[in-house]
Amino acid sequence: MPVFVLEKTTKRPTKPKKAAPNLARKSKKLSDLKDLKYSQFVALYDLWKNYFKSCYGGKDPERADDRLLKADYHGCLLLVATAVNPSQVGLRGIVVRESRNTFLIITPDDRLLTIPKKGTTFQFVLDGHLFTLFGDALGNTSAGRSQKKFKNCSTVPYLLS
C-alpha cells in the first residue's frame, strides 16, 4: 500500500530581493532640466529649420511623403492645436525631448511641459506653410519611426500641409 506524506518536508530556496532603485540620481537629472532657458534653444530651432527644409526639399510641401513622418522634431517650435486635455490647447514651445508617448517642450516663459502625443494634434509653420502632425501617428521616437518596417500602422492621416 502506498504511503503519502502530508507534511511539507523541504524548503524552497528564496530568490534574493533586488535593491531599490537609486532615486537620487534620477532627481538630479530633473533638477538639471529645470535650469534650462528658452533662449538656449532658439539656435537649435534655427538649425532644425534648415534640417527640415532638407527633409522635404523645401520646394513643394504638398508633395510631402513618409520622410516627414520619419523626421526628427527635436528643436521644432510646436503649437498644440487640439488635445484631450483642453488646458493644453494653445501651448507652444520648442521640443527639448521626444519619447515614445510624449514631447517635452520649453515655453517662452521658461516652463518645461510634457505633452502626450496620443489624442493631440500639433502644428508648426515653416516658410509660410502650415504643417499639421497627428500625435497618434507619432507613436515612436524619431529613431523608431525611421526603421523600414512598421509594426503598427495607423489609418489616421499623419501629416497634412
Image: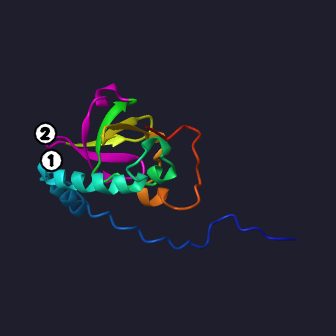
For the N terminus, the quadrant is bottom right
> If you read the primary sequence from the N terminus, does the residue marked by circle 1 or circle 2 appear first?
1
SS state under label 2: loop
Check residue 100 for magenta coloring: yes
Mark 1 surroundings: few (<14), some (14-19) or many (≥20) residues within 10 A: some
Badge 1 amino acid: Tyr
Residue 55 in picture, x, y percent from top left: 40, 55
**Residue 24, numbered circle:** none
The image quadrant where one finds the C terminus is: top left
Going by the image, does 27 lie left or right of 133?
left
Nearer the observer, 101 or 13: 101
Residue ID at (31%, 54%): 74
* Residue 54, picture quadrant: bottom left
The residue most toward the front is 59
Tag 2: amino acid: Asp
Residue denoted by label 1: 38
The answer to whether mark 1 and mark 2 are in CB contact below 8 A is yes
Q: Secondary structure at mark 1?
A: helix
Q: Residue at x 18, y 55 (%)?
A: 43
What percent of the width, then of the height, locates residue 125?
31, 39
> Is 16 or 158 nearer to us in this picture?
158
Q: Which residues are magenta?
A: 85-111
Mark 2, Cα crowd under 10 Å, few <14 / some 14-19 / many 20+, is: few
Q: Which residue is mark 2?
A: 109
Q: Residue at x 59, y 54 (%)?
A: 151
Q: Position of residue 35 (x, y in %)?
A: 12, 53
Q: Quadrant of residue 44?
A: bottom left
Q: Is residue 86 left or right of residue 2?
A: left
How far separated are the C-alphas under marks 1 and 2? 7 Å
Q: Residue 49 location, x and y as percent?
A: 28, 51
